[in-house]
Amino acid sequence: MRLTPQQQTVIKSVLKRHFGDASAIRLFGSRVDDAAKGGDIDLYIEPEIQEPDRLVDAKLKALVELRRELGDQKIDLVIRRREAPALPIYRVARETGTPL
């Protein structure tokens, strides 16, 4: 995994604060591969909160805070609500991702 322990702690703390402590968080994509270089930070979350308006607000606030804490890095945040149709990205993130 190409995230420092400090980056992992920041990500978990920020996302759980905005999406709820019971949220499941995974890192997926190129940052999971230790041999790869570069790449954005791809995060998958199954949030505790489920209301669409709260999710939009939480996503915006979390991305602003992550950028402030981690610096100018591209961060993709994939959010899966319980009622959401099963999309291929959700399957890929769950199967290839690493829990944070």
Image: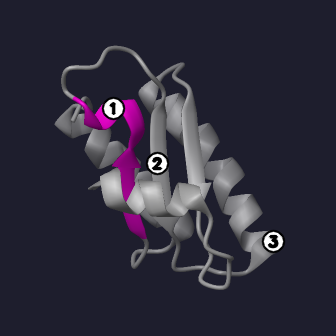
The residue identified by callout 3 is 53
Answer whether residue 93 is visible to the viewer in this image.
yes
Q: Is residue 60 magenta?
A: no
Give, as a single range, the part of the protein colored magenta: 24-33
The Cα atoms of the two marked residues, 2 and 1, are separated by: 10 Å
Q: Nearer the viewer, residue 91 or 40?
A: 91
Identity, as a three-letter code, of the amino acid under mark 2: Leu
Q: Nearer the viewer, mark 3 or mark 1?
A: 1
The Cα atoms of the two marked residues, 3 and 1, are separated by: 30 Å
Answer whether residue 100 is visible to the viewer in this image.
no
Q: Residues within 10 Å of mark 1 (few under 14, many from 20)?
A: many
Marker disc for residue 17? none
Q: Secondary structure at mark 3?
A: helix
Rendered view: 90 above or below 11: below
Q: Nearer the viewer, mark 2 or mark 3?
A: 2
Residue 63's x, y, as percent? 61, 42
Marker disc for residue 43? 2
